[in-house]
Image (spheres, rainbow, N blue to C red):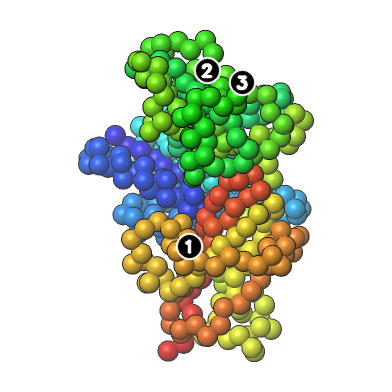
Amino acid sequence: MKYLISGGGTGGHIFPAVSIANALREADPSCEILFVGALGRMEMERVPQAGYPIIGLPVKGFDRSRPWKNVRVVIDLIRSMMQARKIVRDFRPDVGIGVGGYASGAAMKVAAKMGVPILLQEQNGFAGVTNKLLKDDAKKICVAYEGMDVAADNTTIAAKLKFTYGDDVTGIKYLIVNGNVEKNPAEALAILASGTDENILSVEHFKRGGKEANIKAGLEGGLYTVVAAPADKAGALRIKEATAKSFYFPGLGAAEDHPCEFNAALVLPSTYNPALVANYPDETSLVYMALGTEIASVKTYINKSSVIATWEGTPEELVAAYGTDVSAAVLEKINSENGYAGVYNNLTPGTEYTMIFVDTHTDGNRFFGIYDNAKEIHGG
């Protein structure tokens, strides 16, 4: 089997893509895997490091704040789709897998038009723009959480909840709580276990032996978490098998795409502004830039790339352990029209550095990005 995997831009797309590739290779060591990414983005480095070939497309995202710059974006998109057609024709994949990101949109759209069945992986509680645009072309859409799926739109006052379950489940009880408690649902689980709270709901018209149950929940716009637990043959709740899923519900008439964006870069001072070099020489300094909308918090960590490469946990765990929260003043600038730029100085010459950002949006979703300086800091 041949698999074409496309997506990237941030670690939130790249690491799930690599995990999928690893699982495919483990299941079938003889399978062939080819990645398609966006030129200049972090996947062009991270994917080869994971042991997989990748081809870059010149695709870029649309600039919503400066629409006059999108003429070049459209030209690059057309070029990318032409290149994607050649990639599909030469590689002849059996399946295309899209994980989100600009490159995924071009590659998967072309693959679908050329008759390749595509699968979409959505790892976030609120689907990204690319996966939304590709949903009608997909043969299958996978979500990161197996126990429950939540759909939220701006045409009704109801969020749509789908529970998946096995033959041994005789019922499902659930709570809908305000905010994102997906990582720590202990309080909600205790309420479920009590079985007496008036807010505990049951899936109505539950069908034993079915595969899924669908309900609607009337909600105002906001961030919520569904916490649910299945009942066994005796009717007792199996709290240890409970699931939690957070989601943002736009509410009736709200914008379909919750406008949360975050972009960052790590560059030499001369690249950012040559005038800085007098005080911050390229040999020992780096400028980091960040621009976002509706960002609630940002945590950063920077170190030598060689040091970060020795970390055995996930990037999020590294930032959680050693990262620094940006101040309220910096966060305000990140969310402003011009964004924020800061300088790291007194760095080691001749050394590559990596910065990791973990940003939490106002809708509760968390994302992370990994940014390397464009080239090694100069010096002997």
Q: Position of residue 114 (x, y in %)?
A: 47, 30
- The mark found on residue 203 in the picture is 2
Give the CA separation, mark 3 to mark 2.
10 Å
Give the CA separation, mark 1 to mark 2.
39 Å
* Residue at the spot of label 1: 319
Q: Residue furthest left?
A: 29
Tell me: 148 left or right of 18: right
Tell me which numbered mark, 3 or 2, is placed earlier along the sequence: 2
Residue beneath the point at 54% across and 13% down: 204
**Is residue 102 positioned above or below 274 on the image?**
above
| Image quadrant containing the C terminus | bottom left
- Secondary element at tag 3: strand
**Is residue 65 positioned above or below 281 on the image?**
above
- The mark found on residue 23 in the picture is none
* Residue at the spot of label 3: 216
| Image quadrant containing the N terminus | top left
Characterize the local packing of mark 3: few (<14), some (14-19) or many (20 or more) Cα atoms within 10 angstroms: some
Tell me which numbered mark, 3 or 1, is placed earlier along the sequence: 3
Characterize the local packing of mark 2: few (<14), some (14-19) or many (20 or more) Cα atoms within 10 angstroms: some
Q: Quadrant of residue 314?
A: bottom left
**Is residue 209 positioned above or below 130 on the image?**
above
Residue beneath the point at 57% across and 78% down: 344
- Secondary element at tag 1: helix
Q: Position of residue 246 (x, y in %)?
A: 55, 38
- Say what amino acid the circle numbered 3 marks: Lys
Asked if marks 3 and 1 touch (Cβ < 8 Å), the reply is no
Characterize the local packing of mark 1: few (<14), some (14-19) or many (20 or more) Cα atoms within 10 angstroms: many
